[in-house]
Amino acid sequence: MDFDLPSEEDPRRLEVRGWLADHPGPSGRQLAEAGLVAPHWPRPWGLDADPVHQLIIDDELRRAGVSRPSNQIGIGWAGPTLVYAGTQAQKDRYLFPLLAAEEIWCQLFSEPGAGSDLANLSTRAVRDGDEWVVNGQKIWTSMAQISQFGILIARTDPDVDKHQGISYFICPMDTPGIEVRPITEMTGSALFNEVFLTDVRLPAENLVGQLNQGWGLAKVTLGNERVSLSGGGALWGLGPTGADLIDLVRRRGGLDDPHLRQRVAALHIHEEILRLIRLRTVTAAIRGEAPGPEASIRKVLADEHGQAVMALAHDLCGADGLMTDGRPMGDDPGMWHYGWLFSQALTIGGGTGDVQRNIVAERVLGLPHDLDVEVGQTWSQARRATPA
Ligand SMILES: Cc1cc2nc3c(=O)[nH]c(=O)nc-3n(C[C@H](O)[C@H](O)[C@H](O)COP(=O)(O)OP(=O)(O)OC[C@H]3O[C@@H](n4cnc5c(N)ncnc54)[C@H](O)[C@@H]3O)c2cc1C
């Protein structure tokens, strides 16, 4: 953790400040065309920014009170995959509207029989002339009901190993044959959906990358991470932080109950550990070192920390915690109640806590490979069947 952000007079700072002075209250499109939405992307969509340059831009936008356009899956996952493997025509068509959040994207990956074991997916895409005909079902598709496009993975060759024979497509969500059914969650809102695909015809040019090489691209999609110093909220970077909760407790005169006081102290300690892990990741990036195991370790810790923040808030609200009218992230106690309900999802989405622990066990601690247990199989049968 041995870095300082460059001085106030750094030319890269002055350039961002100059641009902001010329573009007060910039639109999403203006930010996108200036390369400020994803500065680490190559030009013309980004600025080829190294980690320090990214942190400077974040700092200047924050100081100016400028928020970037919100299109989490588009900017976070779909865009980097198109930058990496898309054709020039795909890049020209999709990247700027995606960066400007003029077109929202969703991720059609998980299926009822393929979540943690995503390579098990059974949605099929069959070539018919200049089109692909897609049939299958996706589930837990966040924001499908408001998205213009989805990144879709489907099986294009069922006769090879399950990691082969998967291809990656761009799927316009208004294509005939797509039915989106929102799933009402226990929060009362409907963030994600079931998506049924029946004889959905996608133009051949919507294939991304090479035929049958979609599994490698899905890993590019899921592995993309921007360098950021921001602490982020307790709910996958959104919402209040543990520090916000501790501030609230302080403002309300502290706590007498020794058990609750201990939980507040533990929260503070965990928040500090997460901050140090984040700084370590940023330091490594600045030194040009490859990302280490910190991402998986941090996900396990951050998700459980988010749940602890919300559980403590919920307990501190007492009976008031139940007095919510379903407002998402409104004033407390409604905000904390919504957060407590939503926080149950943290250890499931984006790779469950168990799966992240497997990654840490195998890649960091060098423990033997996880057992591939089939339904109905005993543990010792699985041990014999799983390659070492
Ligand atoms: C809020 C939210 C948003 C989501 N958004 C999207 C989205 O936009 N697009 C999308 O495609 N998906 C999305 N998902 C789906 C998410 O990625 C999957 O839920 C996740 O991969 C887990 O898959 P699953 O639900 O099928 O559970 P399973 O994989 O069936 O797991 C069930 C249980 O078994 C455990 N388990 C499974 N395999 C192992 C193993 N090898 N070792 C130890 N334990 C294991 C798991 O930890 C879990 O406890 C979202 C999920 C959530 C919660």
Image: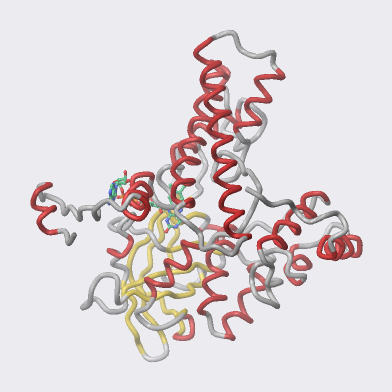
Give the residue displayed 77% in from the left and 70% down from the top: 34
**Looking at the image, residue 383 lies above or below residue 119:** above
- Image quarter of the C terminus: bottom left
Q: Check the image and tell me how it is coloured.
A: secondary structure
Is residue 57 left or right of 169 when viewed as pictured? right
The image quarter in which residue 54 lies: bottom right
Out of 99 and 63, give the one closest to the viewer.
Answer: 63
Q: Is residue 220 above or below residue 286?
A: below
Residue at 61 percent across and 61 percent down: it is: 287
Looking at the picture, tell me which residue is in the foreground, 311 or 1.
1
| Image position, residue 367 (x, y; %) | 27, 51
Instruction: Say how many tags the image has.
Output: 0
User: Considering only vertical position in the picture, is 132 above or below 226?
Assistant: below
Viewer-side residue, 150 vs 368:
368
Placement of 112 over or under 97, stated as above or below: above
For the point 49% across and 27% down, the residue is 311
Q: What residue is drawn where x is 79% and y is 67%?
A: 30
In the displayed structure, does residue 353 sit left or right of residue 235? left
Query: Residue lying furthest top in this view?
Result: 256
Is 212 situated left or right of 2 in this image? left
Residue 233: x percent and y percent? 61, 41
Instruction: Residue at the far bottom: name it.
Output: 129
x and y percentages locating residue 378 in the rendered image: 10, 47
Q: Position of residue 373 (x, y in %)?
A: 18, 52
Image side of residue 57 versus residue 116, left or right: right
Which residue, as the protein is rendered here, is positioned at the far front?
2
